[in-house]
Amino acid sequence: MTTKEISDKARTFFPKTFIMASDKWRRIKARGILQDGKTIALRLILKDDIPYVYVRNSHKYIQPLSCRYDLQDIMPVQSRDVSKQQKWIKGWQKVQKRLEQSGLWTSLLSQLKLAQEIGYDKLQAASEAYWGNHGDQVNAVRAVDERLIRFNDKQEPYVDTELVWFFSKQPRVKKMYFGRYNTRIPEAIKNAMTNKTKYETGARTNYDVSFTYNPEYNKATYSEEYKGCGNGHYYLALDATHAIFCEDD
């Protein structure tokens, strides 16, 4: 390929939004094939619709790609970006696995399985319908999926906000933390869950941390409150080590 053909090919690697905003510099990665067949990594930018390449070992100096006479071809680097939907699916699958292994929060697990059946796209649409139709949220959400509607004792329909609010989002899971050198509490939690014995504890880290486990209901909670304050971050424990964010207060 000629240098002009290589430059024209490289221009197609840039998304259209990059080309339309040609007054700004946009960066992408590519693989250059040298005349001897070897491949090298290239960092490209687009300025005024012209592809440039960074000079080797430089984060500042650039030259037009058409000046790279040592190239015989150029290939795009496939994006490894994971879509929001894929992150959502994988995230909740990990939550489901932890819940199934621990036996905690059986009602939450049932809702999770229903959310997965309904799917990411519908839950996003339901969330938009809920917040965009304050006058008739029930029918707006019902139009997305009937399973998002429940009925009270008077058989009046209402939106299952746990599904629409909680499960439509990416799960925020973290490892419970009781102090850098505190191994006693994690071990005690593990033993309590193994032996199905009630357990409550607390610790002081950057927060006032607390944990409770009630085997009668198969539920466990974890919280991080600001020191000397009754407000903070609240979680549902998924097992003896990890918890999922629930709300801030």
Image (cartoon, grey):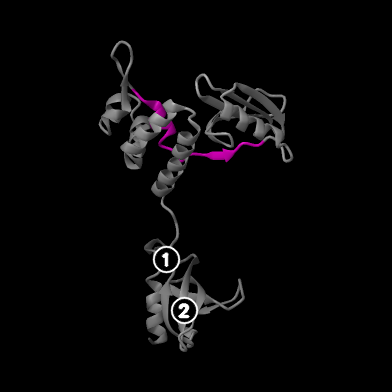
Residue 226 picture location, percent across and down:
68, 29
Q: Earlier in the sequence, mark 1 or mark 2?
A: 2
Asked whether 194 falls inside the magenta stretch, the response is no
Check the picture and name the quadrant holding the N terminus.
bottom left
Question: Does residue 136 appear in this view?
Answer: no
Query: What is the span of residues highlighted in magenta in the rendered image?
Result: 159-177
Q: 114 or 5, which is in the foreground?
A: 114
**Quick one: label 2, few (<14), some, or many (20+) residues within 10 Å?**
many
Residue denoted by label 1:
78
Image point (40%, 69%), residue name: 13
Q: CA distance from mark 1 to mark 2?
A: 14 Å
Name the side, left or right, on which 165 lies relative to 240: left
Residue 113 picture location, percent across and down:
37, 34
Check the picture and name the quadrant holding the C terminus.
top right
**Quick one: label 1, few (<14), some, or many (20+) residues within 10 Å?**
few
Question: Does residue 181 appear in this view?
Answer: yes
Name the side, left or right, on which 55 lies relative to 99: right
Which numbered tag is attached to residue 29? Answer: none
Residue at the extreme front of the image, as rendered: 195
**Tag 2: amino acid:** Gly
Q: Secondary structure at mark 2?
A: strand
Decide: is 132 above or below 49. above
Residue 83 picture location, percent across and down:
41, 51
Q: Secondary structure at mark 1?
A: loop
Image point (43%, 54%), residue name: 82
**Tag 1: amino acid:** Gln
Which numbered tag is attached to residue 32? Answer: 2
